[in-house]
Image (cartoon, rainbow, N blue to C red):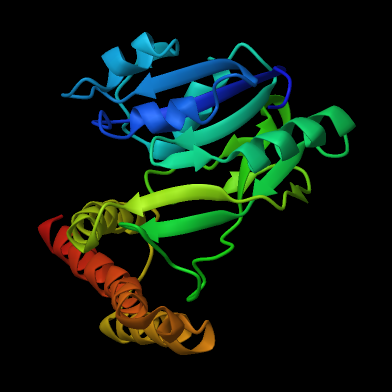
């Protein structure tokens, strides 16, 4: 195991009683602080996290990017590893993180992720390595303050080699449920940004996303699950447009 490093792991969670323990245990023993920011869970997420030794703050998330920035500001250490409760740090990644921070080569790091639907790892279709800025000095990094898919802003990043495990969806039904929530937020963002969308543009983006995921990024190599993921990627565009149009008509 790597030595304890002055780093805070910030975990965002909501109703994750079934997964929070595995997430916390994957960072125990080498991170100096584990901070769980609980989004008013109705289950035992907060109590479980506290029993495992994490510091827990309860705060409702309204705008994702703003909530993430606030959560990171509560950390005791300058270095942050930002996780969601459905992510796991492997021993190899933990070792590489501590080595990278000790080297002082960069102020931000992207980490490749293995995305799963259930127990199936999606290797193609743009799902892997799907690297994201997850490790950073909080003084040089911030999230775009929007409600869905916020962009990360910071200096040029280094890229680690070991994977972060991301259990994105429990199953295909969970994927569908999350798609409905995310497209509702996406539509609200389009309206707030006064974005102009049309049926033609929405259809083009839907077809383009499906084709790119399935063919150009070889999602078909993941079999039936790859087809499903490509279809859902296209559906994201179309459903977002439908909800956007409904909001515009209701205004």
Q: Quadrant of the C terminus?
A: bottom left
Determine the residue located farthest toward the left in the rendered image: 250
Find residue 119 and report its horizontal and vertical position in percent.
34, 57
Find residue 131 and report its horizontal and vertical position in percent.
61, 56
Q: Nearer the viewer, residue 134 or 186?
A: 134
Find residue 75 and report its horizontal and vertical position in percent.
57, 16
Report if residue 49 is visible in the image: yes
Left or right placement of residue 21 versus residue 96 in this view: left
The answer to whether 99 is drawn above or below residue 211 in the figure is above
The answer to whether 208 is drawn above or below residue 229 in the figure is below
Q: Name the residue: 29% across, 24% down.
A: 60
Find residue 171 and report its horizontal and vertical position in percent.
24, 58
Please tell me how many numbered marks the rendered image carries. 0
Left or right placement of residue 172 versus residue 122 in this view: left
Q: Nearer the viewer, residue 150 or 26?
A: 26
The answer to whether 234 is drawn above or below residue 245 in the figure is below
Q: Where is residue 64, by image quadrant?
A: top left
Q: Nearer the viewer, residue 196 or 62?
A: 62
Report if residue 67 is visible in the image: no
Left or right placement of residue 117 versus residue 145 in this view: left
The answer to whether 179 is drawn above or below residue 213 in the figure is above
Q: Where is residue 1, by image quadrant?
A: top right
Q: Name the residue: 50% across, 70% down.
A: 123
């Amino acid at each position: 195991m790597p030595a304890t490093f002055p780093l805070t792991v910030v975990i965002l969670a909501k109703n994750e009683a079934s997964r929070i323990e595995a997430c916390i245990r994957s960072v125990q023993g080498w991170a100096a602080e584990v901070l769980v920011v609980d989004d008013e869970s109705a289950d035992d997420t907060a109590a479980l996290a506290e029993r495992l030794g994490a510091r827990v703050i309860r705060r409702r998330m309204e705008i994702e990017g703003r909530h993430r920035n606030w959560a990171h500001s509560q950390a005791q250490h300058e270095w942050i590893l930002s996780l969601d409760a459905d992510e796991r740090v492997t021993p190899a990644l933990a070792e590489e993180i501590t080595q990278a921070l000790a080297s002082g080569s960069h102020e931000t790091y992207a980490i490749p992720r293995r995305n799963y639907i259930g127990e199936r790892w999606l290797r193609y279709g743009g799902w892997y390595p799907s690297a994201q800025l997850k490790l950073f000095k909080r003084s040089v990094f911030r999230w775009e303050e929007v409600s869905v898919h916020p962009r990360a802003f910071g200096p040029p990043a280094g890229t680690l080699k070991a994977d972060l495990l991301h259990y994105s969806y429990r199953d295909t039904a969970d994927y569908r449920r999350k798609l409905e929530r995310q497209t509702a937020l996406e539509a609200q963002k389009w309206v707030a940004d006064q974005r102009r969308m049309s049926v033609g543009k929405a259809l083009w983006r839907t077809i383009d996303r499906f084709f790119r995921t399935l063919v150009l990024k070889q999602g078909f190599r993941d079999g039936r699950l790859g087809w499903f993921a490509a279809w859902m990627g296209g559906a994201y565009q179309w459903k977002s447009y439908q909800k956007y149009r409904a909001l515009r008509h209701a205004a």
